[in-house]
Image (spheres, rainbow, N blue to C red):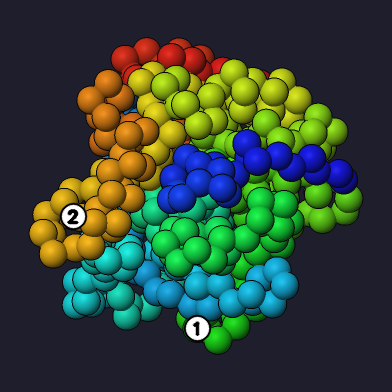
Amino acid sequence: MSLVITATMAVGLCGCTDNADTDGADGAEGSATEEGGTEESGKESGEESKADLAALAAEVEEPGPWAVGTTTVETTGARDRQLPVQVWYPVDTAVAATAEPATYDFPGIEVPAGAVTGASPAPGPFPLVIYSHGNGGLRYVSSFLAEHMASHGFVVMAPDHVGNTALDTFLGSRDETDQVAEDRPVDVQAVIDAATSGQPGLEEVSPVVDGEEVAVIGHSFGGYTALALASRQAEGDDSLDAIVGLAPASSGVDDTTLEAVGVPTLLISGTLDETTPIEEDTLRPAELVSGRPLVRADIDGAGHQSFTDVCDYLGIAESQPDLPAALVEAPQEYALEGCAPELIVIDEAQRITNRLVTAFLLETLYADDSWSPLLSPGAEEGQPLALLERED
């Protein structure tokens, strides 16, 4: 399957090209997501037990029945690069109560996590979700979503695409766009393989991973990554069951590749995204991707960084007077497409992202179609959605 790569695809956390300078909640008995869905929320009862759309939405907008554990491991990616990988997984709330709070180390700052460290995972099996960050991003740059998914019964793993991270931007060690585009799908497949093999560091997590149910979520260049990997299903690779593109970069992907994407697909975009505009990067995959269901949602007023934690980074960086200017200026630049006053409040953007992604992956990976009303026309009423379309 051929891929046509252009510099316009190399967009992500920084919204720039390669030549730019910078780039758990308490458990609830009978929860719809616990152990793959209860009888109340399963296919048999369907809409009959979910007549109230607002109540249905609240179940996936709020944290799920598990607390969240996190750890960092390393795996070998494309060209034998060593990739740091962040792992989030469900944890019993009683176990989490005695565990240490975790943090994420963004360059120069320490970001509090909504997860704990050192806790053993809850019994599975849990579907596997891989998150692929954008150009110049980091593995935990959308921790709001990763933590949320883990609380609803998914193991989430996110690699740093070494050579294309924020750290590489600061250090001047970024790889060329074509090389990055070639490496990224290989990196993601390597993480999928590591998750199911019990590699060092994953001995506790691997046994609770359901390797038969796998999805990839990608932001920006990560959206390209998800599309590229899914297109290979047509060549006999059947390890992927669904993909989610958040402000996906697709303008450099040829039509044949998009047509070969035959797995269920969710595309979420922002109407004020200037880096991967809807007209350039969403319309074509929405027309050409053959996988079903195909759901497209446009968040009204969202920008390119509305799908990341950039506003949290900005607030922390600006609160530290001794931080080097470059480490403050970077999140300030990113924030122009996430926290600017003309954009939707980022908490709202993240709420609707959590709602759509959780419902979609519960439906596709847990085979629970009681969540499909949240992904169908009509569910946008009262929500910050300019568009919600679904093809089955």
Inter-mark Cα distance, 1 to 2: 30 Å
| Observer-nearest of 267 and 313 | 313
| Observer-nearest of 348 and 283 | 283
**Up-down relation of residue 327 to residue 49 (above or below):** below
**Mark closer to the observer (1, 2):** 2
| Observer-nearest of 167 and 284 | 167
Quarter where residue 189 is shown: bottom right
Quarter where residue 48 is shown: top left
Residue at (42%, 22%) from the top-left corner? 272
Horizontal arrangement in the rendering, residue 60 relative to residue 160 (left or right):
left
Q: Check the picture and name the quadrant holding the N terminus.
A: top right
Badge 1 or badge 2: first in the primary sequence: 1
Q: Check the picture and name the quadrant holding the C terminus.
A: top right
Residue at (66%, 71%) from the top-left corner? 77
Residue at (32%, 80%) from the top-left corner? 118
Is residue 135 something that shows in the picture? yes
Q: How many marks?
A: 2
Amino acid type of the residue tagged 2 in the rendering:
Ile
Horizontal arrangement in the rendering, residue 150 relative to residue 365 (left or right):
left
Provide residue 16's location: percent of width, then percent of height. 50, 42
Q: Residues within 10 Å of mark 1 (few under 14, many from 20)?
A: some
For disc 1, the marked residue is: 201
Q: What number is the disc on residue 316? A: 2
Residue at (44%, 45%) from the top-left corner? 14
Provide residue 212's location: percent of width, then percent of height. 68, 59
Q: Residues within 10 Å of mark 2 (few under 14, many from 20)?
A: some
Per the image, label 1 sits on a secondary structure element best described as loop
Provide residue 196's location: percent of width, then percent of height. 63, 72
